Amino acid sequence: MKDINIKPAERLSLVQEYYFSRKLKEVAQMNAEGKDIISLAIGSPDMPPSQKTIDRLCEVAQQPSAHGYQPTMGTPELRQAMARFYKRFYGVTLDPATEIQPLIGSKEGILHTTLAFVNPGDEVLVPNPGYPTYTSLSKILGAKVVNYDLREDQQWQPDFEQLETMDLTKVKLMWTNYPNMPTGGPALMKTYERLVDFARRHGIVVVNDNPYSFIINEHPISLLQVPGAKDCCIEFNSMSKSHNMPGWRVGLCASNAQFISWILKVKSNIDSGTFRGIQLAAAEAYDNSDEWHREANINTYRRRRVIAEEIMRVLGCRYDPEQVGMFLWGKIPERYADAEQLTERVLHEARVFITPGFIFGSNGKRYIRISLCAKDEKMKEALERVKAMSVER
């Protein structure tokens, strides 16, 4: 290999290995050394899907005819279940044949939507702080990332006055994420209404990533509830969080038929349809009872949130008690230079892995994020370890 001059594509210089991909290697090494790290870092639900979902997967997998290629646009059963889900919980009517596209997770949707709407050199509005994939995939695909600020004093909502002062002539997409990750900022109908107005006036497609609307949230809402939203907006939703199915890789995007057809054109050239058993089991999961959602998405996470709040208090961090979602976002004490100084100390002294906010953008550099995706007993143990750490008051 040393005699062959092979270089990677230049686009690799624009991004780094995903923080969690890199950091989990370190945590794995620490565990191999017997340090028993408790991870409160990643939002991967630790609970199973509903039993009927698992039963349906097993049932379909036993069918000899179930193992062939599936349509890229998804099975009719899955698209119809997705439409029922949007009507049941959001009151939004979607044509399952033309206005819904099943996805192999939201990351895939970010890729395909960017490819469908953005030419190299076009600009994309990305929230700061925000999900790192909005930035990394935009860069890989040759788009120019333009950050817009989210601030605590504005409930982590877009600053529309600031947006209106920006040169938007080259902007094709605007990424939003409500309820917000990492900050727990709520989804507000007044924000959705302003986003639709903003998109329409500036000819920008707003894409709202909406996987957290059921987590510690009694009243889920959708951007597509706003009249006219389908004309200029796209919404992603995911089963990873709301249905305890992160490894299944099932999500959706919903919009007008034209936008969906463009995304499908891209998708059909990149992948083939998901295994039929997963699609039909996912369709079953979309019909989970209200009781299942309350226990899985509200009661469980509320119990764990109480423990996470105590961890924040022990660390001297300040947090908004009204935030929603499966994380707790808190501001670090002034004595720390940045969030990573605190999270590294917690990792190596308390053997608890939590997330520094800088990975979500410069506006997160003085914040940390605690995941609620660990058993109650593990979270209680993490609390005791943090208490035992010599935390300066």
Image (cartoon, rainbow, N blue to C red):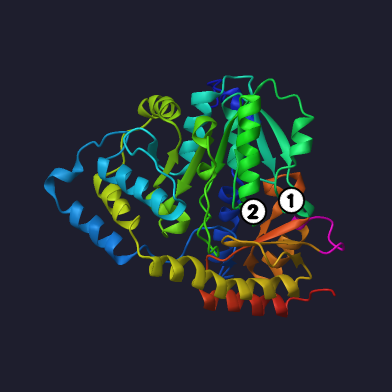
31 drawn magenta: no
- Toward the viewer: 13 or 111? 111
Residue 90's spot in the image, x, y percent? Answer: 46, 51
Residue 376's spot in the image, x, y percent? Answer: 53, 76
- Toward the viewer: 214 or 337? 214
Crowding around mark 2 (Cα neighbors within 10 Å: few <14, some 14 to 19, many 20+) is many
Q: Which residues are magenta?
A: 333-340
What's the magenta bit mostly, secondary-structure-wise?
loop
Three-letter amino acid code at the position of disc 2: Pro
Three-letter amino acid code at the position of disc 1: Gly
Numbered disc 1: secondary structure: helix
Residue highlighted by disc 1: 364
Residue highlighted by disc 2: 182
Location of residue 379 with respect to 5 vertically, above or below = below
At x 61% / y 49%, what residue is drawn?
A: 189
Numbered disc 2: secondary structure: loop
At x 53% / y 60%, what residue is drawn?
A: 219
Residue 322's spot in the image, x, y percent? Answer: 67, 65
